Image (cartoon, rainbow, N blue to C red):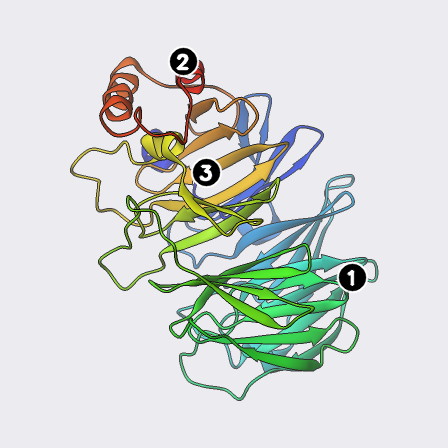
């Protein structure tokens, strides 16, 4: 791949130190193995026309030695065996296909629970249960009546036998039982009206992340108390456009990291105190863009944590930023996951940014800055 054709992907899975991802630029399945990126040709991609075909798949999920492909515009769920390279295509029921939109992905996200994966419809008002052992859809349920052009569910999360699916353009959260996919409760969140980007479940509490410029809402499940969190740091700013502000929450050591789409900075929520702080060191690298690219969105395409290392796909150039939470070391990667690549000019610009904007902050130490420049 050339630098201009850097891959764009929503997530990756790792098996035996090999990373697998669906590249939404090339509309193809790739693996990254010992410094080499190579395409794994599938039946569904053999005759594709580069950049012309609708995006087939997006997110990947790992089930044993199988990879499950979440459909974007594809009409079937794909299960790929890493052991045998066998491809299993499971057709999506016609009732669901007929109600999908050609402007939104078919499904928003999924959750693997034991031998099942539950998929939440983005452009059709359904949830679907697929048994991964039997390789078949065992049930699906309509959640709402069809609304033309509606955006139903972007995220679904599991906890203690229940599934939580928030509205991306409203303030309701649907709670399902995993067995029958029945709605057992519906929350109407206070303090959020425009939409919910995502949610984080931790220690009998759920944090709901606003899609736009509204408060974060914490729900204490046992007491049924909603807490408004809007103590934004003085340096943090919402975007000017009516777009997603923050997304891709990652929780590590009682801290929730949130990454900007249109907002100004990466922020961190202390789950014990509800304090919000800006991640200054990481923002120095993330926001190190030329004036020509400073307004390009999204700022972050995805963020994912593995072995206490956060990988961030930077939006304006599709470069991966690697952030080690133990050492505070940051690397900017070129088209891959392994090789560090920070050229002198870029490092110099980041040094100036760091000195001008960050070095007086209590949020980071001089030691972590020295480690970063090495």
Question: To which residue does mark 3 refer?
Answer: 312
Is residue 325 among what the camera can see? Answer: yes
> In the rendered view, does 212 fall on the left or right side of 39?
left
Q: Is residue 239 left or right of residue 50?
A: left
For the C terminus, give its image quadrant. top left
Label 3 and label 1: CA atoms lie apart by 32 Å
Label 2 sits on a secondary structure element that is helix
Residue 73 versus residue 85: which sits nearer the camera?
73
Residue denoted by label 2: 370
Measured from the top left, where is residue 114 in percent x and y? 81, 57
Q: Which residue is identified by label 1?
A: 135
Image quadrant assignment for residue 162? bottom right
* Kind of element beneath mark 3: strand
The one nearer the camera, 343 or 213, is 213
* 34 is higher (above) or lower (below) than 198: above
The residue at the point 36 percent across, 59 percent down is 244
Image-based side of 140 in relation to 106, left or right: right
Query: Residue shown at 41%/84% (left/top)?
Result: 148
For label 3, count other residues whose C-alpha is less than 10 Å away and answer few (under 14), some (14-19) or many (20+): many
Q: From the top left corner, tell me how far across and down residue 297 is, in percent.
A: 29, 49
Residue 25 seen in this snapshot: no
The answer to whether the residues at label 3 and label 2 have Cβ atoms under 8 Å apart is no
Q: Which of 65 and 264 is in front in this view?
A: 264
In the image, residue 345 above or below residue 5: above
Q: Distance between the residues labelled 1 and 2?
A: 52 Å
In terms of secondary structure, where does tag 1 sit?
Answer: loop
View extreme (bottom): residue: 145
Q: In which quarter of the image is residue 17?
A: top right
Q: Which percent across, then down, holds residue 303?
A: 49, 43
Residue 211 at x, y percent in the picture = 40, 63
Q: Residue furthest right?
A: 134
Q: Quadrant of the N terminus?
A: top left
């Amino acid at each position: 791949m050339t630098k201009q054709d850097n891959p764009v992907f929503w997530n990756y899975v790792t098996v035996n130190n090999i990373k697998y991802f669906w590249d939404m630029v090339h509309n193809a399945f790739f693996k990254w193995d010992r410094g080499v990126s190579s395409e794994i040709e599938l039946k569904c991609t053999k005759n594709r026309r580069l950049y012309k075909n609708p995006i087939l798949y997006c997110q990947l999920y790992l089930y044993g030695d199988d990879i499950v492909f979440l459909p974007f515009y594809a009409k079937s769920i794909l299960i790929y065996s890493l052991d045998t390279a066998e491809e299993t295509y499971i057709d999506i029921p016609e009732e669901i296909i007929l109600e999908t939109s050609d402007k939104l992905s078919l499904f928003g996200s999924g959750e693997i629970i034991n031998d099942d994966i539950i998929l939440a419809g983005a452009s059709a008002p359904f949830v679907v249960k697929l048994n991964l052992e039997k390789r078949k859809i065992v049930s699906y349920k309509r959640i709402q009546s069809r609304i033309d052009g509606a955006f139903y569910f972007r995220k679904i999360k599991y906890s203690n036998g229940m599934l939580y699916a928030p509205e991306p353009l409203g303030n309701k959260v649907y709670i399902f039982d995993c067995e029958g996919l029945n709605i057992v409760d519906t929350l109407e969140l206070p303090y959020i009206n425009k939409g919910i980007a995502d949610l984080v479940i931790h220690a009998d509490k759920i944090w709901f992340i606003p899609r736009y410029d509204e408060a974060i809402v914490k729900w204490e499940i046992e007491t049924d108390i909603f807490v408004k969190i809007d103590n934004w740091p003085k340096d943090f700013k919402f975007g000017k456009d009516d777009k997603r502000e923050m997304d891709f929450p990652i929780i590590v050591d009682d801290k929730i990291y949130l990454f900007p789409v249109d907002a100004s900075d990466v922020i961190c929520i202390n789950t014990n105190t509800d304090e919000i702080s800006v991640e200054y060191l990481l923002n120095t690298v993330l926001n190190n863009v030329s004036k020509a690219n400073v307004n390009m969105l999204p700022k972050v395409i995805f963020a994912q944590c593995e072995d206490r290392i956060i990988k961030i796909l930077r939006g304006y150039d599709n470069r991966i930023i690697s952030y080690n939470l133990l050492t505070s070391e940051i690397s900017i990667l070129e088209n891959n996951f392994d090789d560090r690549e920070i050229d002198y000019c870029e490092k110099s610009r980041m040094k100036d940014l760091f000195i001008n904007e960050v070095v007086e902050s209590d949020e980071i130490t001089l030691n972590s800055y020295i480690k970063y420049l090495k």
